[in-house]
Image (spheres, rainbow, N blue to C red):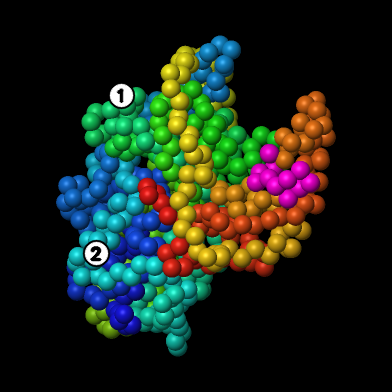
Amino acid sequence: MQREFDVLVVGAGPSGSACALHLAKNGVNVLILEMGRHHGEKNVSGGIVYGSDVGGFGLKRLVPDFEATAPLERKISSHEVHILSSPNEKKGSYREYTISRKSLASRFGLFSVEFETGHDFTVIRSQFDGWLANLAVEAGAALSTETTVLDLLKQDGSVVGVSTSKGELRAKLVVDCSGVTSTLVESAGLRGALVPRELYQGIKHVYRLGADKIEERLRLKAGNGRALTYLGDFMLGINGNAFIYPNRDTLSLGIVASMDSMIRATTEHFDRVGKLLDALDAFEGHPMVRELLQGAELLEFSAHNIPKGFTCLLKRPYTSGYLAAGDALGAFVKIGPMVDGMRYAIASGMMAAQTYLAAAVSGSFREKNLSRYRDLLTPVYEDVNRSGRDSFISESGFVYRTLPRLLFGSKLLSHKVEIKAEDGSRKRVRHGTDAVTYVEDGGYSQIDVNVELASRSVTKPWIPSCPANCFTLTTPGGSVSSFRDLFRQNLDAIGGGHKRKALGQTMRQVAESKLSFDPMGCVECGACRAIGPKDTIGFRYESRGRGVSYSFG
């Protein structure tokens, strides 16, 4: 392999491939380094790509004919927010309130639902990311898969390359598009590891249902889709929401939750919720969703941490010889029901490429010549900061808990929905973390856990926060992967009328019992790393293309 390049791009997601494509079109000698066996294998998102530009950079500008050539699923024509009450099984009904363009909640600014740009589509990441990376290769970029970047190489105060699982590589510029778990941005000295208050955790199921049933049940025209967001008691006290995005013949259903809220709920209120997957199960068990999923087959479970952009966007996104883009930069926007990462990943990747082209005129890639990157990013920073201001309302306790109570307290504001009898069921051949494909790595573990230190923790938050059940608690009654399971065991043993006693016993067992860790099935989300601390949890990337492998993502 050639060892010196103009630019090294770390990661073949939308940001990395957009950067490499823009560079290759301009004749730059660029290499994309991807740790997966193929591009898109390890990438996860809810599934909507917004094709419009940000500050003159975007998918429409990069690939003008993408709507005809990209592997797109359905065109998103509208966004809706549905607030659901808990079902009243005795009355056979539940109540619902829909926020649309004309609703009072939208008019008063509690939720904006007008986000369509005319170029927005659901995508399957494994396909979309592969398409974009292949365009970069066709334009002249080189691509090395199963290549894990270990660290930055530095010389005289500048980044001059990277060390990888296949040896050292050198370049005039390194563009870090390695995602939310990037360790390179820390090595560059631009920030520390992200912590729970700076992250969302997202989990998702993909179901096969068939195009005809999707269009019939969601009242869609052929090829069209709607972005559906849901609020309600199914979140079990966790700050967050559910979503349903229709693909061509599959549905993506998931939960996006503030990680700090999830940790508090699962460690302090474990009588109600044990893991974020419990909220997803509660959502899928709601009569409205249950009806939609009749006859559907579960294909895949995925999990991913998401940067809470307004809390972690880099103040300085560059240092000599290095730029950060996409999730590594913190370029993520969530405004009400709109979850928008890919548009900003693509735009920031292109902006990083443009920064290289401008700096190359002088031949210097020191900080001073790369500072123009921050200027190009101005519209990205403005949108991210706007999402922060919006979050004071859209991600508040008022919206998550008070607003539903107000709506359902008055029958005039919401409407009643009769629960229909099921004539079919979800084909849950696999459930949750069982629906994950994992390529074994011969004993290699990307997570190093100091079990002795972790076992001393009174709350052991890694256990309920791990979406893959890698962390468990060893008790006299066996191993459990959530404290709710342990609480229920104790409640059954003590008697249903002694909830307080069962809670106290559970808390003592959590504090006193030993934590165990098994890396098999790790989905590489980085939740345990975010909780830390470093002397308890060590993190590194999977090597040789091993680890989790997503077919949909």
Q: Residues within 10 Å of mark 1 (few under 14, many from 20)?
A: few
Reply above or below: 424 against 542. Answer: above
Image mark for residue 373: none
Relative side of 454 to 26, left or right: right
- Give coordinates of residue 59: x percent, y percent: 25, 54
> For the N terminus, which image quadrant?
bottom left
Residue type marked 2: Ala
Location of residue 130 by image quarter:
bottom left
Determine if residue 1 is in view.
yes
Q: Which residue is mark 1?
A: 216
The picture quadrant where one finds residue 100 is top left
Q: CA distance from mark 1 to mark 2?
A: 38 Å
Residue 369 position in % (x across, y down): 34, 78
Vertical arrangement, residue 29 with respect to residue 123, above or below: below
Q: Residue at x 47, y 15 (%)?
A: 421
Q: Earlier in the sequence, mark 1 or mark 2?
A: 2
In the image, what residue occupies the spot 40% across and 31% down? 296
Q: Nearer the viewer, residue 543 or 94?
A: 543
Asked whether residue 265 is drawn in magenta, I would say no
Residue 123 lies, with reference to residue 412, above or below; the image says below
Front-most of residues 73 and 446: 446
Q: Residue furthest top?
A: 91
* Disc 1 element: helix
The answer to which of 331 and 126 lies nearer the viewer is 126
Q: Position of residue 98 (x, y in %)?
A: 42, 25
Q: Which residue is mark 2?
A: 136
Span of residues in magenta? 474-485
Q: Amino acid at mark 1?
A: Glu
219 displayed left or right of 437: left
Res 354 seen here: no
**In the image, is residue 483 part of the stretch drawn in magenta?**
yes
Q: Is residue 46 left or right of residue 493?
A: left
